[in-house]
Every structure is written in structure tokens, then in C-alpha cells.
Image (cartoon, helix red, strand yellow):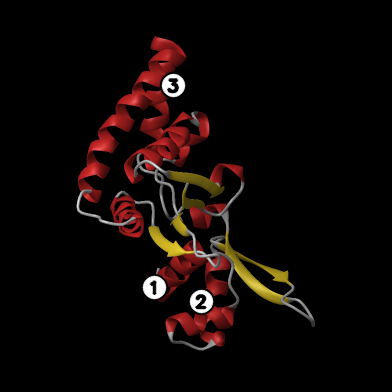
Amino acid sequence: MSERAEDLLYLLKTRGPQGAQALGEALGMTSMGARQHLLKLAGEDLVTSFERREGVGRPKQAWRLTDKGHGRFPDRHSDLTLELISSVRELYGEEGLTRLIEKRELQARAVYDKALEEAATLEEKVERLAEQRNKEGYMARAERAEDGSLMLIEDHCPICAAASICQGFCRAELHLFEEVLGEGVTVARTDYMLEGGRRCAYRIMPD
């Protein structure tokens, strides 16, 4: 696959559905050039087109990833992970699985505390947390929402297969974020991949 095609897939993964013109502008190419690459990707069932309305006038064509396209950004060791979770549940029950999740949370807490230890403000903490999550494969970034609140946005979930059969992993991560960001901070999930969202996003607010 060409570098341009890979770039298009990455843009659709991180930005969501886009028109050929917007994709072309982002990559410094014409909309026609972007469309030619998109058609090739569609032939490989990696992207698909649809019509969406933007303001007044006729609907415009936009492009998005298919399930196969999302699969280009793999879930880390998903088959082995699912097998291990099933084995823990079979051998030790839900209590054993809960203890496993708690152990993972403690290990992650130590890593995140170290990553955030020199951050002086909440904004710096969120930026450091995003940097660490990005290293772990979550395609994470920190942003300011239109209302001024801080957002942690993750365009990919490298443990999605595990989370899909045990949402305790997701609950533990939400709790972990509140713990490492400190007292007086509330973290609310606003987008969730396991509920059909294209990404996971968290609004971070001082109490």
C-alpha cells in the first residue's frame, strides 16, 4: 500500500468521516488525487463512501473507514488476550478476573504517577497523561473543548477486544484517570467505542 493511502486511512481514523477535498487539503494534494486513492481503498473494502448534509444544498459525498479499515489499527495481541481472560474467568471466576484488573490498575497507576509527577497544573497533567497513553497505542491527545474544558481524546483502543468481553477494564481506566489527576477532579466519558462511538473521549473538570 502506498504512503498516501496509509495517510488517508490515518486521517479517517483520527478525524472521522471526511470529504475528498478536506482529505486532499490535509495531505497537500488535489481532491481528485485523494478521490483516486479512496476509490482504490474502497476496492479493498477499507473505506466506504456515503452522503451527508452540510448546511443547505445537496448532500455531499464523504468517506469513512469500514470495519476492515479499522482493523488496520490492530488490537494488541487480541486473540491471546481473549484466551487468557476466558481462562482466568473459568479457573478463578469473576472474583479472580476482578483481582487481575485491580492488579493491572495498580501497575498502570505507578507508570502514570511517574509520567505526571512534574506537572504543575491540571492542563499539564492531562497533556502528560495523553503523551503516556499515546505511547501505549491509544492515539491519544489533549484538547480544549469549545466551552474551555479539558478533553482527553483517544482515537484507538489497543485493548478493545479485552474490553468488549470485560468492561471492568474500561471502568478501571476511568477510575485510574481520576486517581492520577488528583483530588477535586471529575472525569466523564463523553464518547465510547464500545457503544458505537468512533473514539473514546473524556471531559476533565475541576469540582
User: Secondary structure beneath disc 1?
Assistant: loop
Up/down of 142 relative to 71, above or below? below
Up/down of 119 relative to 51, above or below? above
| Crowding at mark 3 (Cα within 10 Å: few <14, some 14-19, many 20+) | some
Up/down of 188 relative to 19, above or below? above
* Residue of label 2: 37
- The residue shown at (52%, 45%) is 188
Q: Choose between 63 and 206: the one closer to the eye.
A: 206
**Residue 123, image quadrant:** bottom left
* Residue of label 1: 2
Where in the figure is residue 184, as x and y percent of width and height?
41, 43
Where in the figure is residue 200, as x and y percent of width and height?
50, 50
Closer to the N terminus: mark 2 or mark 1? Answer: 1
Closer to the N terminus: mark 3 or mark 2? Answer: 2
User: Secondary structure beneath disc 3?
Assistant: helix
For the residues labelled 2 and 1, the Cα–Cα distance comes to 9 Å
* Residue of label 3: 86
| Residue most extreme to the right | 57
